[in-house]
Image (cartoon, rainbow, N blue to C red):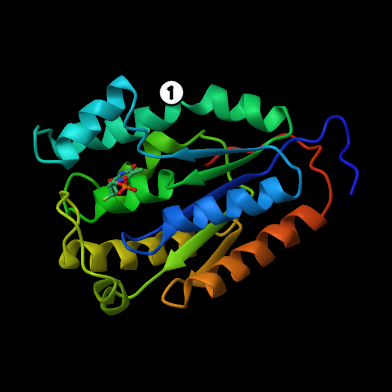
Amino acid sequence: GEKGKNARGHLIVVEGLDRSGKTTQCHMLCEDIGGLDKEFKYIKFPDRTTATGQMINAYLQGNAEQSDQAIHLLFSANRWEAVQGILNDLRAGHTVVVDRYAFSGTVYSAAKDNPSMSLEWCWNPDIGLPKPDLVLFLDISSEDAAKRGGYGEERYEKQEMQAKVRALFKHLFSRLNDLNVKTINAGLPLQEVADQIWQAYKNLDEAGPLTEDLQVLS
Ligand code: FDM
């Protein structure tokens, strides 16, 4: 359909566990959006290229230590420093596809079971970030993830951690009830997952141009 002059782009977040195929699916989605002759932008968090991202990368690879609180806030800062760019893209009418966001930020930190970091505490620094129009949660059991060749070498890539993260994702999404979340079984073959993501995108796109301002996470 015709896009109104003031229509903003959609903010779409893809979330999920390690080995859920998130990044592959983001690329397939972007390619299909581009195929419709629409402008898109792909962003991955953590963005390891910035100053905060380099600190996060060193932590994840085991080359630096951080307190649980400090690394949590660095992940959040890594999103906050990208906000103006995201808003500019959305206002220019571009679709922004985000690979991990505040939801990963909250559940990976909460999964550490640090008694001074409740789920609420973990969510707090991300309050005010642009709120996605759609969250695609790629859900995969640890058995299915293991079939894909197991986890890598980074800090959180352990089965026990992943199981906690999965439960916390479900818990967090059940609590954020004004959020548009679509859970997709990421244990299905790649193309079936891609088809379901595309259907969810089409539903959003066909609902018409977005003229209202973007909301924020609360
Ligand atoms: N992760 C990712 C966090 O712990 N907090 C965050 O805010 C984000 C965005 O970092 F284990 C974790 C999730 C994962 C690790 O992510 C690196 P990628 O997607 O593998 O780069």
In the rendered view, does 196 fall on the left or right side of 75? right
Q: Residue 74 lies in what quarter of the image? A: top left
- The relative height of residue 5 versus residue 218 in the rendered view (above or below) is above
Q: Please, is residue 136 above or below residue 192 in the view? A: above
Percent coordinates x, y for residue 156 in the rendering: 19, 53
Residue 134 visible from this viewpoint: no
Secondary element at tag 1: loop
> Does residue 171 appear to the left or right of 28 in the view shown?
left
Residue at (23% x, 69% y) in the render: 149
Which residue bears the numbered disc 1? 81
Kindly identify the residue that appears in the image at 74 percent across and 62 percent down: 203
Q: Nearer the viewer, residue 156 or 114?
A: 156
Q: Residue at x 64, y 24 (%)?
A: 88
Residue at image x 83%, y 44%? 209
162 is higher (above) or lower (below) than 7:
below
The amino acid type found where label 1 is placed reads Glu
The image quadrant of residue 113 is: bottom left
Q: Position of residue 89 (x, y in %)?
A: 64, 29
**Foreground: 34 or 110?**
34
Where does residue 188 sit, x and y in percent of width and height? 46, 78
